[in-house]
Amino acid sequence: MENKLSAGRLKILLALSLFAFVILVGRMAWLQLYKGLYYGAQADGNRMRSVLLMAPRGKIYDCNGVVLADNIPAFVLTIMPGHKLSDDEVRRLAPILGMTEEDIRAKVAKAKETYEPVPLKTELSMKEVTILEENARDLPGVSLDSQAIRRYVYPGLASHVLGYVGEISEEQMTRGRYKGLPQGSIVGKDGLEWVYDGDLRGVNGRKTEEVDVRGRVVQQLAGQPPRTGRNLVLTIDYRLQKTLEDAMDHHLAELGVQAAAAVAMDPNTGAVKALASRPDFDSNWFVGGISAKNWNRINNNPHHPLNNKVIDGEYPAGSTFKVITGSAGLETHKVGPEELIFDSGRHWLIDMRNAGGEALGWLNFQRAFAMSDNVYFYEVGRRVGIDTLDEYARKYGLGKKTGITLPGEASGVIASPAVKQKLLKEEWYLGDTFNTAIGQGLTLVTPIQLAQMLSAVAAGGTIHPPYLVDKVLDNEGATVSVPARPAARSLGISEDTVTRIQNGLKDVTRAGGTAAWFSGLPQAIAGKTGTAENPHGRDHSWFIAYAPADRPTLVLVCIVEQGGFGSTASAPIIYEVLNNYLLGYPNLKPKAEGDGKPAARGK
Amino acid sequence: MQRYLRNMDWILVLTVAALMVTGLILIGSATHADAVASGQNRFVLRQGLFIGINIAVVIFMMRIDYHSLTAISKQLYIFMLVLLVAVALFGHTSLGAQRWIRVGPVTFQPSEFSKALMIICLASFLDKQREYMDSLKDYLAPMAFVLVPFVLVLRQPDLGTALVFASIACSMFWVCGFKVKWIGIAGAIGACSAPLLWHLLHEYQRNRIRVFLDPELDPYGAGYHVIQSKIAIGSGMLFGKGWMQGTQSQLSFLPENHTDFIFAVAGEEFGFIGVTIILLLYLVLIWRALRIALNAEDRFGQLLATGVTGMLLFHVLVNVGMTAGIMPVTGVPLPFLSYGVSSLTTNMVMVGLLLNIHMHQARLQF
């Protein structure tokens, strides 16, 4: 057919077709050659499901091998990486898991950004697991896996020592010590779980599976098993801890107060044998995410249950400070040990009196200490002066953290003209020195500082700073490491002075002392009452003690907030604990005790 | 008979045969999981069976005198309209569009057959117009002629087939002498009326266009097909993952992998080399079809061959472009490769027509 127009136009059509095919081939080259590796990785991301196998955390033992924290198997529901849960699935899951649809969608949004499975809910109940398994067909976007989760064997016991674990937060993933850990990692959040997380956490493993579009496993690919974390052996003695917490709980209930702190340590080593703060919490609450109910319980309590008052509570030392005032007076010879000072009920320079308004007449050091006479110690304070008092407070470790390996320790305060000027913009008066000498005023101490102070006296003049972790074991029970502890140091006070302080402390619990009824214990002990003035309410009640009096093996310090006089609130708690300690815990079932070989139980 | 064999466009026949065999191989891979489950690959068997049946149709189409189609073009046009109305009334829905009609045990897609009918009817209609259509008025009647079925399929809603009609009309108008400046004007009008058209589109069609512009808008919904298809093709790289080894295809990440997205299977399993060969086969097919149009013995034959070319070209460009993420998802199958009896039959009938036209031109030469 002869038609030049149509012939030309057909040729143009052919040229256009050729052009279009060149573009298509070019596009193929772009996708397959230039971006081939990228799409290859995407295809692998589609078909390969990497399941994170969480390493079980290491166990925590007490000093006798009693397990305080271990792991139990639990089911966890995870969102498959790269999957979007359909609205239908979200609607089905919400009632099963008891979560709101918004909560689920928030987690799904997180899962979209990662190739790691994101836990939707950990620690599922058996009922939830059953329902989920029955509905598995309708829930292709989630996977039900078994996982080891933390369990604190004795709920609430030593919670301030152990701390707790939780899922890594968004913020922790981007900075700080946990930076770079995958979503869903369980990390220590407080207490020893936080401090020793590096030992306890272990190394997560993973298994890789090939799956089809519905998430069905086609085949298992390579994998790496998880490595369990290392185990901690604490200095804590379960028996003492349990005795102490029980004693605190029922005495606080009787007193009708909530806040208290107590710590026990071995004065010869610095090993902390028990440590408790009230009000407390159960570390198990935090496993798998804390419930709103428990969170409100913690948040709405005005006494801050999460705070460890043993290390972060700062209180006036009350009469327990007389250990320091006495040491300063005797050591500087500003007061002779047998020198008699007359207590007329008030000091002759300033009208400052005894707490009960009494007048005790002529007193030597030991008697004044046992009776906790204020007028006597005003005079000692006046003679040595505030600078020397402060020097001795520092010798005993006040005003400075003890260095115990728990987060959040407070330093306390040592009163001085400079501190007063800074805090109150006022000059220093003699009355301030008097107040400081009997432990009132601006000086603030933590219970752990007082325990360290009394330990130094009990140990004859050597400070053994407190520590909590004895050693770190691997899973075969071999010692991996022994955490470094602060070195013991001398108080720098003569043996004679220390002995006189000891004698004063012993007389406190003898006939005529402020806690004479302690003579009912199986062995003699030494101690000191203290009453910390509290401008916001009733006074705080201190009692510090060591036992036995002659060859001390245990120092105990207790404060009951708003408990009133030291002898009325704190002393009964310590009495009960020491009685059990000295009798070998007659009330505790042997079952709770360990066999002394932590590793043998590590399974 | 000897004359038939001698005057056959063997390059065209072999090209189409190669494409159909490739199609069977790809369908076999794409439906492998189903075959394992049911014990036999019913998709390959069915496609193969219809290839066999349609060879007879092709021979029939070759033997008739294509000029006789002009005589029944009016009836064919009415038949096409009835078919399209029927599918609108009785068709059942698949993927939100009414496209299937069931007759006894057989379901078929009338819109596929309507493509062939459209080519024949429009070629016949244009053939009756004056030879030099150099006035815009000359195109008013043909446009109206196309517009009626066009609106019917658009209402189905079947955007893909509507655009195929448009591509057939455009290619034929072009050969008739539709002026370049009119195209420019039409383009301007189209651009101005785009908001109105946008308004007329169904919501799912609008979403397809939105998602075509940015598949990541809805990576698990409307954008899912394209994203997975690009992953399949791209991950094939130079040599491909091998037959039945494509993870995207075999693990069902690639949807519609034996029909509209069959080309992505080719890309994944046979790589750049494989898809280049397939694209070359299509280029040869277009070249042969245009050559037949060029050498057709009369205007009707030329228009027929041009319409077939336009239709095939449109299918290939839109389908391959869609799998490669440079065209919107419109549900257009890939000729001879996609599984689908209606599409296969239509395309083979068209090839029969091409061969018929080729044969007549050859006869003239003797």
Image (cartoon, coloured by chain):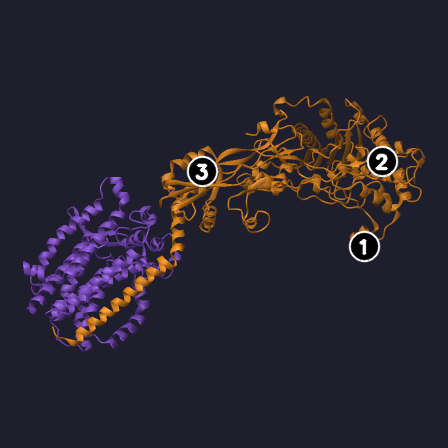
Chain colours: A orange, B purple
At 15% across and 58% down in the image, what residue appears?
Answer: B13
The quadrant of the picture occupied by the C terminus of chain A is top right
Density class for disc 2 (Cα within 10 Å; few <14, some 14-19, many ≥20) is few
Instruction: Point out the frontmost of discs 1 and 3.
Output: 3
Which badge, 1 or 2, is on the more N-terminal residue? 2
Which badge, 2 or 3, is on the more N-terminal residue? 3
* Rendered image: mark on residue A425: 1
* Rendered image: mark on residue A304: none
Residue B81: x percent and y percent?
A: 16, 60
User: Which element carries disc 3, helix, strand or loop?
Assistant: strand
Residue named by callout 3: A145
Residue B351: x percent and y percent?
A: 15, 60
Left or right: where does residue A563 sit relative to residue A220?
right
Vertical order, A402 against B79 (above or below): above
Q: Amino acid at mark 3?
A: Asp
Provide the chain ID for the residue under circle 3. Answer: A
Left or right: where does residue A343 sit relative to residue B91?
right
Instruction: Point out the frontmost of discs 2 and 3.
Output: 3
Vertical order, A17 against A431 (above or below): below
Left or right: where does residue A215 sit relative to residue A266?
left
What's the CA distance linking mark 1 and mark 2?
Answer: 31 Å
Vertical order, B302 against A87 (above or below): below
At 73% across and 32% down in the image, what residue appears?
Answer: A266
Front one among B112 and A125? B112
User: Which element carries disc 2, helix, strand or loop?
Assistant: loop
